[in-house]
Image (cartoon, grey):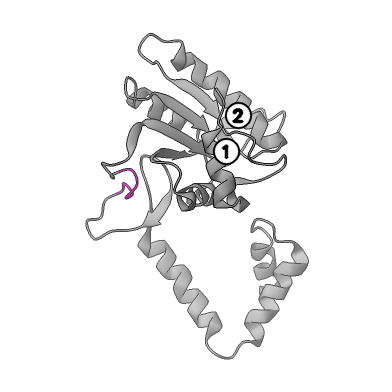
Amino acid sequence: MNSIDKLTEIFSRFPGIGPRQAKRFVYYLLQRHNGTTDDLIRALDDLKLETSQCSRCYRFFPKNHAGSNICSICTDKTRDESLLMIVPRDTDLDAVEKSRSFKGLYFVLGGVLPVLEREPEKRIRINELRERVKRDEGVLKEIILAMNANTEGENTSDFLKGELKVFQEASFSEFTISILGRGLSTGAELEYADPDTLKNALLHRTK
C-alpha cells in the first residue's frame, strides 16, 4: 500500500468519513504549500503529549500543570455528586456542557451497543461503570442515561437499565434511573442537538 492509500485508509476510519472524502483530505494536504502538513504533524504530536484521560469519567482533557489524572469537571466541588449522567462519547458530554443545563457529574461510556451485540464489554466501559457505581454507593440519587434517540441508543439504555437494577435493588443503593425526555427527535444524536433541545430533554427526562 502506497502512502496516499495508507493515509486515505486512516482518514476513512474517522466517524462520518467515507473513502472518497478521505482521499480529498489527502490531496488537500498534498496541494498545500504553506506548512499545513507540518502544522498537522505538530498538532498530532502535541495532542498525545498534552491530553490525558480522566480516571473517573473517562473524558479526554488538556493536561494541567499539577499532572492530575482527574479532569476539572470531576474535581469541581460545586458539581452535584448525587447526579451522574452517562453519555456515549466525549462529544456528547461537550454538547451537554454547552447547554449549561446540567450541574452533576459524567461517565463516558465509550460508545453504544448495536442490537444483538454479544460482547458488550468490548464495546462499552460496562465494567468501569459498575466500579463507578459501587464507589459512589450511598451518594448517587439519580443516574441519567443520555443516549442518542435511535435504535442503538435505545438498545444501550435497555442494557444499562438491566445492569444498574442490580445495584438499585441492593439495600445500599437507592437511586433512580432516568432517560432524556423526547425533546430529542427520533434518530437524533446528542452531539448535534442544539442547547435548547438538550435543556428540554433534561427538564422532561423520565424515570
- Which image quarter: residue 171? top left
- Estimate the x, y position of residue 127 in percent, counting from the top left: 47, 29
Relative vertical location of residue 98 with respect to residue 173 in this rendering, above or below: below
Q: Give SS at disc 2.
A: helix
Residues rendered magenta in the picture:
69-74
Q: Which mark is residue 201?
A: 1
Q: Is residue 4 left or right of residue 67?
A: right
Q: Nearer the viewer, residue 113 or 38?
A: 113
Q: CA distance from mark 2 to mark 1?
A: 15 Å
Q: Is residue 74 left or right of residue 25?
A: left
Does residue 2 appear in the picture of this structure? Answer: no
Q: Nearer the viewer, residue 101 or 15?
A: 101
Which residue appears farthest toward the right when viewing the image?
20
Q: Which residue is mark 2?
A: 157
Please report the residue visible at 32 percent of the width from the left and 58 percent of the height from the top.
63
* Nearest-to-viewer mark from 2 and 1: 1
